[in-house]
Image: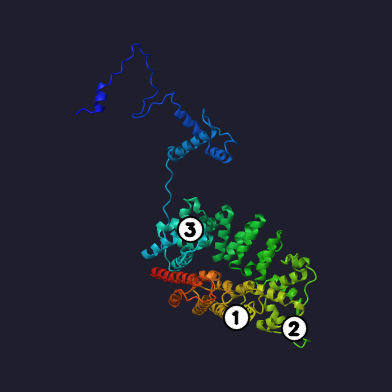
Amino acid sequence: MTTPATRARTTRTPRTEPTAPRPPAPAPAAEARPGSRPQTPADPLPARAAAFTRTPWEELVTTALLGTDRRTPPLDAPGKEAPIALLDAAAVQTVHRRAGLRPAPAAARPEPAPEDPRPVVPPAARRRLASLLADHPTAGGGRRGTAPDLMELLPQWLALAIDRGFAAPSELLPALLTAARGRTDLRPQALAFAGPRARWLAGLNPDWKFALRAAPHRAAATGAQGRAEVERRWQEGLFAERVALLTALRDHDPAAARELLADTWATERAEDRLMFLDSLRTGLGPADEPFLEQALGDRSRNVRATAAELLSALPASALAARMADRASSCVALDRTASTPTLTVEAPHECDAGMERDGVAPKPPAGRGERSWWLGQLVEAAPLATWRHRLGGRAPADIVALPVADDWRGELHAAWCRAAVRQHDATWSRALLGAPSAPDAAGPGAVSLAERAKLLAALPAPERAAWVAGFIDAHGLSEAFQLLGGCAVPWAPDLGRAVVDALNIARDAGSYPWSFSGVMGLAERCLDPAEAVRLDALTAVPDEREDAAPGAGGYWSEAFQRLVTTLRLRAEMREELTP
C-alpha cells in the first residue's frame, strides 16, 4: 500500500551534482570518531560554551549577587544582554560541573573500618533508633499534640544502649553522626555508642570532623609508642583537639596530663592557658598544687583567678590556709551578747598578696568594695575553718547564728559558694535547711539557683526526697531548677509528688502552658511505671465556671502525650534488654 509519505519519498527529485569542479578537500587532521558530529570553525556553539566555562564560578556568583548593572560579567557573548549572558554561562557551567569529570589516577582505597567487638543492638532496637533519628522538630515550634518528642528521647536511648554494651548498626552511623553534628549535647553519647568507626567515618566526610576532635583519645600513655602518639597529638593538633586530648588523658592519668601541659605552658597563649587549666578540674588532687601555685604568678588575670579557685578546692593547700587566716580575721563570735552573734569586719583594702591569691580588687557595678572582698575570702577558705573558729559548732548551728549589721546575706552566700566548690554535703544540708521551710530560699541560700547547686552535693536518694518535700510545701512553680538536678528516672516519692502537683494544677482550671517545662522534664524523667496512675488524667475534665476556656482539653492533651512518652520509654527499655 502506498502512503503519502512513501509517495513523497519516491517522487522527490534527486539533487544534481554541481557542474563546476570542486576543489580538493583538505586532509583531515585526525580521523573522526564514529558517530561524532564534525565541528568546524563556522560552528560558534562549542567555542562560546568553552568561553563560558573559562570564567570562574566564583566570579559568576559575585556578579549575580552584585547585579549586572553594578558589575559587567566578564563574558564574550556578542549580541546578548548582560543578564542573559550571565544566566547562559551559569547554565553551561552547571552542566559542565555535573557531567564534566576529568580522568584522574584512582585514589588509594581507604583502610578498612576498625572492628567493634560489641554486639549490635537487636532488630527491634535498631528500628527504634532509626525512628528516633528520623524525627525532626515541628516547624516553627508549633504544638506536637499527643505525639512524643522523639529527639528528646534519643539521649536516653543512647544511654541505655551504652549501658548494656551494644554497638551501633553500621547503616545508621551516618544518621547518628549527622544528628550529633547539630546537637553538641548529644556528641559524647553518640561517639561512645558509635565506637571506633566514628573516627574512621569522620576521616572520610568533613561534615563529621567534630568526631576527630571530640572522640575520646584513649591512646595509652604507657609504652614508647603510646607516649609518642599522645605527644604528636598534643604538638600537632588543633586547639579543640588538644583540649579534648588533655581532658581525656586527665580522666585516666591526671599526672601525665599535667606533665604534658607543663612542658608547653610557657609557650601557650593566655586564652589557651585558661582553657587548658580549666581541664585540671577533672581528677584535681594535692599533686596538682605545685603547678597551680606556679600559675598564680601568671601574667593573665583570668589564669590567676582560675588557678586560685582550683587551689581553694584543695582544703590542704597553702592558698587555702592563707585564705583561712584572712577570713578568720573578718568573722568572729560575740559572746558578750545575750545570744551568741556573729560579727563581721570586712577587709579595708585588697593588698598585693590577696590579689595574687585570686581576689579581684574591683567589684562589679552595685557592689561595695569591702563586701566584695569579704565574699571572696570566705568563699575560698576551707569550711572546716569555721568549726574551730566558732567554738566547735556544727555547720547547722553556725548557719542558725544571728549575724550583726546586716552581713547575714553576704556571709551565707559566700558559704554557699564554698560548699558547692568543696562539694561538702554537711554544709550543703545546713544551708539548704528543711524543704518545708516557709522561706523558699532557705536559711542560708539566697536563691533557688543556689539551692539547686547545693543539692548536687547530696546523694541522689536524699536529693530526690528533699525536692519531693519542697514540691509538697511550695508546689511546682518554683521547683523547676531543683528537678533538673535529680537523678533519672525520678525516685518513686519524687514522681508521686510531681504527678500530684500536676493534678492539683489541672483541677485549678488554669492553662498547662506555665507547667510546660515541668511536663517536658516529666516525659524524660518519670518512671515509666507511673503511666498507670496517669491514665485517669488523660480524660477531659469537667470545666469549672471560673476555669480558663478550653483548659481541660489542653490538660488532657498534655497528659496523653506524657502517658504515650512513658510507655514508649518502657518499650525502649524492653527492646534493649538482652
The quadrant of the picture occupied by the C terminus is bottom left
Please report the residue visible at 68 percent of the width from the left and 61 percent of the height from the top: 303
Mark 2 or 1 closer to N-term?
Answer: 2
Please report the residue visible at 70 percent of the width from the left and 79 percent of the height from the top: 386
Position above or below: 548 against 219: below
Left-right relation of 148 to 6 = right
Please report the residue visible at 52 percent of the width from the left and 38 percent of the height from the top: 57
Point out residue 186 in the picture as x, y percentages from the top left corner. Answer: 51, 62
Mark 1 or 3 closer to N-term?
Answer: 3
**C-beta proximity under 8 Å, tags 2 and 1:** no
Position above or below: 350 against 436: above
Name the front one of labels 2 and 1.
1
Point out residue 554 in the picture as x, y percentages from the top left corner. Answer: 49, 70
Give me the disc on residue 341. Answer: 2
Q: How much space separates mark 2 and mark 1, taking CA atoms?
A: 25 Å
Callout 1: SS: loop
Residue named by callout 1: 435
Q: Amino acid at mark 2?
A: Thr
Q: How much space separates mark 1 and mark 3, taking CA atoms?
A: 40 Å
Nearer to me, 276 or 491: 491
Q: How much space separates mark 2 and mark 3, taking CA atoms?
A: 58 Å
Residue named by callout 3: 179
Give me the disc on residue 554. Answer: none
Name the front one of labels 1 and 3.
1
Packing grade of label 1 (10 A; few <14, some 14-19, many >=20) is many
Q: Amino acid at mark 3?
A: Ala
Position above or below: 552 against 248: below
Point out residue 432 in the picture as x, y percentages from the top left corner. Answer: 63, 78
Position above or below: 95 against 437: above
